[in-house]
Image (cartoon, rainbow, N blue to C red):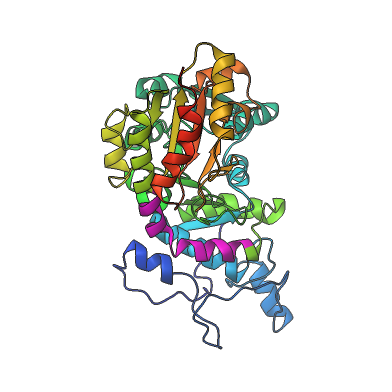
Amino acid sequence: MVEPKNPKRLPRVDLPADARLDTIAVREGLPASQYGENSEALFLTSSFVHPDAATAAARFAGEEEAFVYSRFTNPTVMMMERRLAAMERTEACIATSSGMSAILLTCLGLLKAGDHVVCSQSVFGSTIKLLGSDLAKFGVQTSFVSQTDVAAWRAAMQPNTRLLFAETPSNPLTEVCDIAALAQIAHDADALLAVDNCFCSPALQQPVKLGADLIIHSGTKYLDGQGRVLAGAVCGLASLVDEKLVPLMRGAGMSLSPFNAWVVLKGLETLSIRMAAQSERALALAHWLEAHDTVERVYHPGLASHPQHALAMAQQNGCGGAVVSFIVKAEGAELARRNAFHTIDSTRICSITANLGDTKSTITHPASTSHGRLTEPQRLAAGITQGLVRVAVGLEDVEDLKADLARGLDSLRP
């Protein structure tokens, strides 16, 4: 959708041009209404009334920016979109009903039959299924490559490649890709780079600064921060968001509800302090796990042993994030699965759920949950073994979390 020249625009919050991220996280959105509310208002309405037919026509035609119908325009949703876009340092943002709907919206808005995608083989299981099989039915082909091998990304490029898709750090092995290098590969081929920034959020990482064109979010995770609602978002250039994605949203309706947008909007206000505190606890837990004699390997970008540690520290504002994965020692896949289940089932504090980003620590067995719908070869290609356990660290005392995991791990000793 190409907007008319100089349409009437909705007002913006009067913030200094050099306002920093933590200030933007609390203040960006829409100006208060005539009632002067300090906390952002929640607009629970499906439609909006126009003063006359001519104004309604102008608004529907895009000649005047206004709220028309909550499937694609709502004040609360716009506040969340403006805030997240400002935090990601992008021109625009469109909110969606979930993180997966944000990926679907991106693909449907930018790709057509005959196009090709290059994607990391280490992304979230549902993303692999969406790109690898669901979109293939409509003529969009995807090549999956090593998350960390830049040469493999370059070798997978085809004349019809239109999109590179990466998730960094990856779920659950926390593999880190070189965003700047992938952006160069994409732009050299007149393609776009989309980065799923779910694990880091803009509090730790802003991929657009490294050349990414689109930033994908599952707002369900750290943006909300307390496991309350489903939400998603795509941030990027206005030419992409407004001209490619907004028209599709208007027809397809993967809309974020105003209430869920309001919850995420308020979650963004504490994002930085939560990410700092949870990342600090995660690193402490990762160090403890590395020293445990029943743990074979630990994955956390903050560890010096992490293969992409230096890159992660450069891209992620010197912080490793709040997700720790580890492999329990065992001989064979069957025993590894049994030991992983035992470790999980022995916890009394961690919540056994595949969600992450919560203030409550969560623990899961990726091979049978988040990546359970993949084939065994797909799981193994992504490094998802039966002995792998993922912990998304919350805000509990880290000594209590160590004790919680020790209950199961200690009893694995001969």
**Is residue 188 positioned above or below 375 on the image?**
below
Q: Is residue 33 left or right of residue 174?
A: right
Q: Position of residue 393 (x, y in %)?
A: 45, 45
Q: Nearer the viewer, residue 305 or 27?
A: 305
Q: Nearer the viewer, residue 61 or 393?
A: 393
Image: magenta residue range: 260-278
Q: Nearer the viewer, residue 159 or 281?
A: 281
Q: Residue at x 68, y 30 (%)?
A: 134
Task: Name the quarter where the N terminus is drawn.
Answer: bottom right
Picture mark count: 0
Of all residues, the one furthest to the top in this rendering is 332
Q: Looking at the rendering, which quadrant does residue 300 occupy?
A: top left
Residue 265 in magenta stretch: yes
Q: Residue at x 26, y 34 (%)?
A: 310
Q: Position of residue 405 (x, y in %)?
A: 47, 36
Can residue 357 be seen in the rendering of this structure? yes
Q: Looking at the rendering, which quadrant does residue 104 occupy?
A: top right
Residue 202 in magenta stretch: no
Q: Is residue 317 left or right of residue 85?
A: left
Q: Position of residue 60 (x, y in %)?
A: 67, 68
